[in-house]
Image (tube, rainbow, N blue to C red):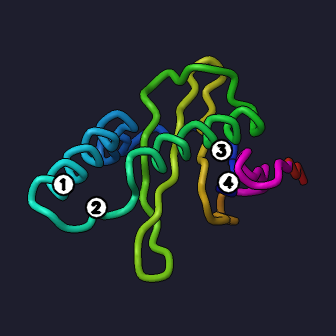
């Protein structure tokens, strides 16, 4: 998965409106279990896809300057894309008062991004 990682000014408010990575994983697991029990398709993303994306997003955050464990739990946000929604992540790092936004689509209003492809794609780092 390709990520655009932004080191942005600290985000100080409205964190409570986003779900944590842990809460999102739990919700995906519930949707998966319900689809298996009642039949039907599992709505995207599936658990493995989401966890793999989170792992590669952490690499992108590191490339943008994140230095380790977040001060707050990482959060998930959703963006509309071609008839569906896709997810990105936001991490607040307390030790230098930064926030990192990791998005699968460019968000130019946030500034200049560090661009990264996951290991599944050709590995590439482009720092402008």
Q: Position of residue 28 (x, y in %)?
A: 29, 48
- Gap in angstroms between the C-alphas marked 1 and 2: 8 Å
Between marks 3 and 2, how big is the CA–CA gap? Answer: 35 Å
Q: Are marks 1 and 2 in contact (CB under 8 Å)?
A: yes
Which numbered tag is attached to residue 42? Answer: 2
Q: Main secondary structure of the magenta part?
A: loop
* Residue pointed to by mark 3: 8
Q: Is 47 located above or below residue 41 in the figure?
A: above
> Upstream in the sequence, badge 1 or badge 4?
4
**Which label's residue is closer to the chain start, 4 or 2?**
4
Q: Residues within 10 Å of mark 1 (few under 14, many from 20)?
A: few
Element assignment for label 3:
strand
Query: Which residue corresponds to the image point at 44% horizontal and 26% vertical from the top-left?
Result: 72
Which secondary structure, mark 2? loop
Which residue is depicted at the point 75% across and 52% down? 117
Q: Nearer the viewer, residue 93 or 57?
A: 57
| Residue in the picture at 61% in, 27% down | 97
Q: Label 4's element?
A: strand
For label 4, the residue is 3
Task: Specify whether residue 120 is painted magenta.
Answer: yes
Q: Which residues are magenta?
A: 111-124
> Gap between marks 3 and 1, in whole Å?
40 Å
Q: Nearer the viewer, mark 1 or mark 4?
A: 1
Q: Which mark is residue 36?
A: 1
Label 3 or label 2, whichever comes before in sequence order: 3
């Amino acid at each position: 998965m390709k990520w655009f990682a932004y080191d942005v000014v600290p985000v100080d408010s409205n964190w409570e409106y986003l779900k944590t990575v842990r809460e999102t994983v739990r919700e995906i697991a519930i949707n998966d279990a319900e689809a298996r029990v009642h039949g039907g398709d599992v709505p995207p993303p599936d658990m493995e896809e989401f966890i793999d994306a989170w792992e590669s997003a952490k690499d992108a955050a590191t490339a943008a300057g994140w230095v380790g464990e977040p001060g707050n739990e990482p959060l998930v946000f959703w963006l509309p894309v071609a008839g569906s929604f896709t997810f990105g992540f936001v991490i607040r790092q307390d030790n230098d008062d930064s926030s990192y936004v990791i998005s699968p689509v460019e968000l130019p209003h946030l500034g200049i991004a560090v661009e990264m492809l996951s290991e599944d794609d050709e590995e590439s780092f482009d720092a402008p």
